[in-house]
């Protein structure tokens, strides 16, 4: 018998996105892959929803994806967060 799948909600992705933004505010030079962010910034239990949260943050300009030569995406603070920081 299959084990029940854990259900994730859009609110969980929003919470993860807020945690990523807060981390980047505290560590402006931070950058990592999706897996690295999930494991080291948030905790392993956050990995399933980290991708959706990062997609939302990239779309809003708060996070940017820099594609490396091996095709991996490294996420870092985006222009929207930089502008917000300068304004405050």
Image (cartoon, grey):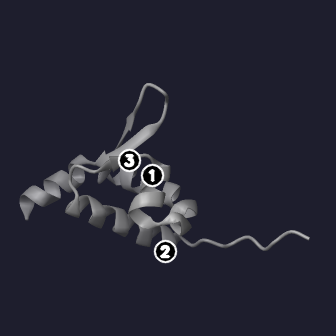
| Residue shown at 47% from the left, 36% from the top | 72
Furthest toward the right, the residue is: 1
Secondary element at tag 1: helix
- Disc 1 versus disc 2: nearer the observer: 1
Would you say 15 lies left or right of 44 here?
A: left
Residue that numbered label 3 is attached to: 32
Kindly report the distance in space between the C-alpha atoms of the residues bearing marks 1 and 2: 22 Å
Q: Quadrant of the N terminus?
A: bottom right
Q: Quadrant of residue 4?
A: bottom right
Secondary element type, mark 3: strand
Residue 58 position, x and y percent, is 38, 49
User: Which of marks 2 and 1 precedes in the sequence?
Assistant: 2
Name the residue located 57 percent from the left edge and 73 percent from the top edge: 9
Position of 66 relative to 55 (above/below): above
Viewport quadrant of the C terminus: bottom left
Give the total of numbered labels. 3
Residue underneath mark 1:
36
Task: Quote the CA–CA distance across marks 1 and 3.
Answer: 6 Å
Disc 2 from disc 3: Cα separation:
23 Å
Residue 59 vs 43, above or below: the answer is above
Of circles 2 and 3, the one toward us is 3
The reply to whether dot 1 and dot 3 touch (C-beta < 8 Å) is yes
Query: Label 2, on which residue?
Result: 11
- Quick check: 82 left or right of 59? left
Q: Residue at x 55, y 68 (%)?
A: 45
Residue 63, horizontal then vertical, whole percent: 32, 50
């Amino acid at each position: 018998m299959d084990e029940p799948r854990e259900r994730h909600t859009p609110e969980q992705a929003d919470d993860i996105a807020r945690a990523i933004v807060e981390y980047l505010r505290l560590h402006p030079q931070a950058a990592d892959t999706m897996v690295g962010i999930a494991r080291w910034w948030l905790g392993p239990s956050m990995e399933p929803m980290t991708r959706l949260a990062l997609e939302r943050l990239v779309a809003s300009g708060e996070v940017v994806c820099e594609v490396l030569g091996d095709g991996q995406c490294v996420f870092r603070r985006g222009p929207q967060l930089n502008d917000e920081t300068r304004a405050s």
